[in-house]
Image (cartoon, helix red, strand yellow):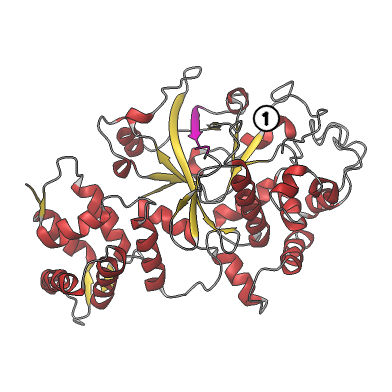
Amino acid sequence: MNDTPSVLPKVSEGYEDERIAASNSSARLIYLDEVSAVSLQMYNIFIYQKLLNTNATVVTDEWLYSCIEGEWIHNKLAIEHWNYAIHDVPQDPTEDGKFVGRDPGRAGMSLHDFLEYNIAKDANLNLCEVLALRLYTGKGFYLINTSCRSANGNFAATVFAINRAIGKLALLCMHDESFPSQFFRGINGRLRIPFQNSYYKEGATSGNLGRLCDCAIFSTTSDITVATGAYGGELLFVLSCKVHKVEDTPQEIDANFQLMSTPAPVRWISQFPGEDEYLWPTNTSLAPKIKSCRSGITFDGREVYEFTPSHLWDKCNYCIGRYKDIANDEMEMARMTLKLAAKGLGMQDAHIAIQQILVDKTVDDEDFDVEEAASIAFCVFDRTGQGWLDVTDIKALVSYFYCEVLGLNRRDSAAILNKISSDVCPFLGSDGRRIRWIEFKNYCFANVTKA
């Protein structure tokens, strides 16, 4: 699998890692609860919209290439990067020193030459995916990541192809016992104080710690000296992944999804192979390791944060997240979130919170964080963040959660619904159909006791 030409420079050898670190500001990170992190990964909204806009129903190679091309050739800031990626590598790819370290030893190579690499064949990469990786691993990465963080969909097809390539490469590498288990990313700035406090708090559980994510493609390196070089920043993120035995498969979430924790190695195709870059897809969830599981790694006085990353792989459609049959109905998205979250993607205490806080009003688990669990539970229902929710929506979601996800019989589920309906009544709005969510939430908090 490792057929990278020997002419490539050694990692960190006379090379400053400007490209991989150019967008590493902590201000671009998103702080999420567990359920929101799941929701963010689940749907490829922009590729779905592009399908609708072009009257297409499925992502084909021809359709995807046409869309990728359109995203680059009609953008005056992007056309230079497109032309470099689709043509053979020039004799002098550094362009008079403009891009030091660019494609060393690759003069004359074409996209089809990259497709012939064993790693590309073994991962079953196609032309669109190779092209997308070439675009991202050059200076065009800035346009792609800026679009992701702005949520404008300008490079939706390119991002879809990158994510799909990452997933395929991750599946290939997850059984490789020689694959690195730790990856590093330098970050500028500081993390938010509440996150810092919870991260260092004694006895904090995974549910207490929340999640971090970047809406963009997340670049890391296996070489700590690259991540902590001149462009490394004040913080150091350490991401750990699990290498599975050959007979093992990633965690099955349901018939469609697998939970992945492996990145994609792209040194073999990167325009700047000196970075020894490993990519994670958009919206990768970074779960802080609980204190007892941290390695205690330190480096040159930097603040170090250790994470377990994860992303969703749709094994039926070969993509990160879901793009087919996305319903515009918020209820459908909430149902899917509940199902996935309850299967192991977080929300560890949410079902306890729903029952204990909304029903029993008593918590008998000594380690149970009432406020954290309740916040998770409530955000499941208040999907739009508007503060109001239709009572019928509450009943539908609770019924689905207890009957379909937890497997309770309908009689027990009906009893829970009746109890919740009784508590909701005092908070109904003037229309008699909606409740002011924050009032009901405060009421629940006020009535929660520790057993």
**Which residue lies under the disc numbered 1?**
17
**Would you say 184 lies left or right of 132 here?**
left
Overall secondary structure of the magenta section:
strand
The front one of 336 and 32 is 336
Residue 227: x and y in percent read: 59, 28
- Quarter of the figure with the N terminus: top right
Q: Quadrant of residue 351?
A: bottom left
- SS of the residue at dot 1? loop
The front one of 241 and 146 is 241
- How many callouts does the rendering have? 1
The front one of 322 and 344 is 344
**Would you say 41 lies left or right of 144 here?**
left
- The amino acid at mark 1 is Asp
Residue 132: x and y in percent read: 72, 53
Residue 153: x and y in percent read: 61, 62
Residue 408 in the magenta stretch? The answer is no
Is residue 138 visible in the rendered image? The answer is: no
Q: From what the image shows, is residue 121 above or below residue 332?
A: above
Q: Quadrant of residue 129?
A: bottom right
Residue 238 in the magenta stretch? The answer is yes
Is residue 127 visible in the rendered image? The answer is: yes
The front one of 14 and 286 is 286
**Would you say 257 lies left or right of 195 here?**
right
Q: From what the image shows, is residue 361 above or below residue 279?
A: below
Residue at the far top in the pictured view: 300
Residue 79: x and y in percent read: 80, 55
Residue at the far front in the pictured view: 247
Q: From what the image shows, is residue 89 above or below residue 238?
A: below
Magenta region, residue range: 234-243
